[in-house]
Image: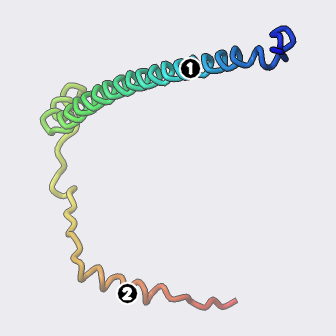
Amino acid sequence: MAKNRKHQSAAIRFGPALKAILLCSVLCGSALGYVWQKYQIYDLGQLIRKRELRLTDLQNQNEKLRRQLGQMRSPAFLEARVKELNLGLLPPEPSQVWYLTEPTPESNKSDRQMAARQSAPVAMNE
């Protein structure tokens, strides 16, 4: 005799429904993960674009300030600023200017040897 559905175990009756629910939840979870991942990629792309624009703005501002600094260091600008502020600064007298010579590598070598000889430890008397 054929068994009656009424007497089948609960696991057999709910098995296909459980598989369908599990499959649907896996598909929905995968779809949500995919959408979240795409949103993260879009969001990071926007962040990169904003930072690149900020970098470009900062580079332009840096270049503008570099030009302004070069202009402010020019002798003509400095002289005009001294006159404007009435600082009373004058060019230095020739006796106030000291000219230093650039040491040559040979003189540096001999100086180092001399310094090495002079830097030997000295015994101190107590």
Q: Are marks 2 and 1 in contact (CB under 8 Å)?
A: no
**Residue 43 locus on image (x, y percent):** 43, 21
Residue at label 1?
Answer: 27
The residue shown at (87%, 12%) is 7
State the scheme by which the image is colored.
rainbow
Q: Residue 75: image x %, image y %? A: 15, 39
Query: Could you give the CA–CA distance between mark 2 and mark 1, rounded to whole angstroms?
Result: 83 Å
Q: What residue type is labelled 1?
A: Leu
Quarter-of-image position of residue 52: top left
Q: Quadrant of the N terminus?
A: top right
- What residue sits 50% from the left and 89% below the top? 120
Q: Is mark 2 on a helix, strand or loop?
A: helix
Could you say which disc has been placed on residue 114 in the image? 2
Q: Which amino acid does label 2 sit on?
A: Met
Could you say which quadrant of the image residue 67 lies in?
A: top left
Q: Is mark 1 on a helix, strand or loop?
A: helix
Task: From the viewer's side, name the closer residue of 9 and 23.
Answer: 9
- For the residue pair 45 and 30, the one nearer the viewer reads as 30
Give the residue at x 23% y 35%: 66
Residue 83 place in picture, x, y as percent: 18, 29
